[in-house]
Image: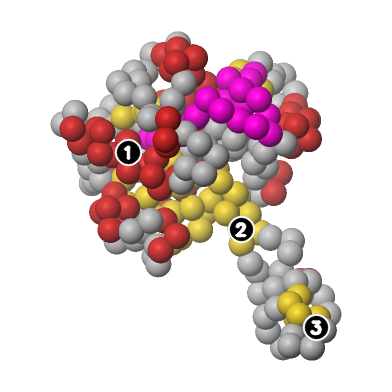
Amino acid sequence: MEKNKDLYGPTLWLIPARGGSKGIPDKNLKPFCGVSLVSRTVKQAIECADTSDTVFVSTDSEAIKKEVEKNDIEVPFLRPAKLATDSSSTYSVIMHSLESFKILGKEFEKVVLLQPTSPLRIVKDIRDAYELWNPGIDMVVSVSQSRANPYYNLFETDKDGFLKISKGPGNYTRRQDVPKVWEYNGAVYVMTTNSLLKEPLSCFKKVLPYEMPASRSIDLDTPDDWIIAELLFQRSNPSK
């Protein structure tokens, strides 16, 4: 992180970790290969942050707060219950954190959002995405190449109900020839605070991709995701 340390303002390393989870109960506290998801992410953030930065876990849960504090970071305020539901937006959580820290006298030039549900993300992914950021853009976001491609194997129905290729002329016969398309994998977001103050992430225009391989892009939503992710982690880290 030395490259940006003296050039730009401090960073908020924000880890959203609410207590409720339907797909995988107590997901953020559940040990993944021996370390809870939230602690695993906190440790990565601490490793990447500069001394002027703040690592913060946004949670509504006292149990998660206690788990986080084992890593020697503070949780000076909890997220209100209304921002910890299935329908709560990531943007509302980010803005609550920024506004609450402003009251405490802390402001940030950028926000790095690290979701605990990306346990195969490595520190190098975070650092490399961070290094792509500059104050002239809205966001750097981690992506993986999508196997489903609107030029090749995604279709829509026409007015007569027949399938037609979603985008392009429809004459591609090899996947290798079609333009690449990307999907957010949820692992790393590096956002400019001024952009966040103007509009939500979905409205950002100046967004740079940071590509991650599919093997590190699993987002944990279901028990099956968990099983697959642990197998991949153990294969890549046989000693852990």
Range of residues picked out in magenta: 10-31
Toward the viewer: 202 or 170? Answer: 202
Quarter that holds the C terminus: top right
Quarter that holds the N terminus: top left
Toward the viewer: 106 or 25? Answer: 25
Q: Which residue carries the number 1 mark?
A: 96
Task: Find the residue positioned furthest to the left.
Answer: 105
Does 17 lie within the magenta span?
yes
Please name the amino acid that badge 3 sits on. Gly
Q: Circle 1 sits in a helix, a strand or a loop, which is it? A: helix
Please name the amino acid that badge 1 sits on. His
Q: Circle 3 sits in a helix, a strand or a loop, which is it? A: loop
Asked if residue 159 lies left or right of residue 143, the reply is right
Q: Which residue carries the number 2 mark?
A: 183
Per the model, the C-alpha gap separating discs 1 and 3 is 45 Å
Q: Which residue carries the number 3 mark?
A: 161
Asked if residue 210 lies left or right of residue 237, the reply is left
| Percent coordinates x, y for residue 220 in the rendering | 66, 37
Above or below, 111 against 33 in this view is below
| Percent coordinates x, y for residue 90 in the rendering | 45, 45
Does 46 lie within the magenta span?
no
| Percent coordinates x, y for residue 50 in the rendering | 32, 31
Asked if residue 16 lies left or right of residue 79, the reply is right
Task: Find the residue positioned furthest to the front.
Answer: 82
